Image: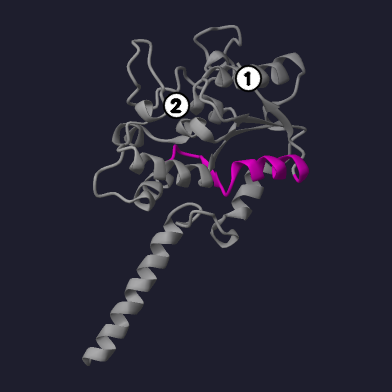
Amino acid sequence: MNRTTFIVSSASLAASAGVAAGAAVPGGTALVERRASFDEAAFAGIVGRPARIRQLVESVAFNPTTLNNVKNSLNGLEFGYGYAPSDVAVAMANHGAATAYGLTDAMWAKYRLGEFYKIKGNNGAPLTTNVFYPAKSAYDPNANPDDQRGMYQDTSVSMLQRRGVIVLACHTAIEEQSRKLVEQGFAPTEATAQDVADDLLTHLIPGAIVVPSMVATVAVLQAVYHYTYLTLTF
């Protein structure tokens, strides 16, 4: 192989690697997600599955009481109205500080997300892990719904997902917040905003679905998939 051929081949490999890396990041590596980077078929299959009741809960400010409300909605629909769990589709549309629900412990620790989002524990110190994710009970559909320690009173994100709740993650929010993490000194010194965004997008909690823009997705869920809209203020 001559030098010119080697250079061209190396450039092609580098370009291919860049494309592969971009493809491996949910939603891609651009600030504004393009349709080509959006797994629309997977999104449609999940939010558009057969259901008699569809509800979306939009969360911008971080308030864990929202998780309790989602739990109460599931319980009311199942035990009060008699809808089978398979007939109910509830989506959590998280953006703003609520993006943190969908990020793993490793990301909470690495980027000091408790400090960044101003999320504190009972001791008043910023949280260092996503304590809202792990299940607090065993999955048991035969559990007594009144049992405070049972799955029907478990407000963890993991248990809500197990019960069918769809957790959405906003690509735009993560891209924008990554820039702030760098600007405000929460990222490693050598990291760029894109490095941080790629890191966060590839370290979401299991089952989280990346959407291009949450405010746009709310409109699509309502207009196309007929989700009723709920936002909670406290």
Q: Secondary structure at mark 1?
A: loop
Residue 129 as seen in the image, left or right of residue 169: left
Type of colouring: one colour
- Quadrant of the rendered image containing residue 72: top right
Q: Is residue 87 magenta?
A: no
Quick one: 121 or 71, which is closer to the camera?
Answer: 121
Q: Position of residue 105 (x, y in %)?
A: 35, 32
- Which of discs 2 and 1 lies nearer the camera? The answer is 1
Rendered image quadrant of residue 143? top right
Q: Position of residue 133 (x, y in %)?
A: 44, 26
Amino acid type assigned to the residue bearing label 1 in the image = Thr
Q: Secondary structure at mark 2?
A: loop
Q: Which residue is mark 1?
A: 233
136 displayed left or right of 94: left
Which quadrant of the figure has residue 40? bottom right
Q: Is residue 84 above or below residue 13?
A: above
Front residue of 84/182: it is 182
Q: Decide whether residue 213 is among the magenta residues.
A: yes
Q: Give the residue pinned by disc 2.
A: 133
Q: Is residue 51 left or right of residue 90?
A: right
- List x then y, in percent, for residue 233: 63, 19
Dot 2 and dot 1 residues touching (CB under 8 Å):
no
Tell which circle, 2 or 1, labels the residue nearer the N-terminal end: 2
Residue range of the region highlighted in magenta in the rendering:
204-224
Check the image and report above or below for 113 versus 13: above
Which residue in the rendered view is the most extreme toward the bottom?
A: 2
Q: What quarter of the picture does the C terminus occupy?
A: top right
Relative vertical location of residue 73 with respect to residue 96 in this rendering, above or below: above
Question: In the image, residue 63 lies at what x, y percent?
Answer: 52, 20
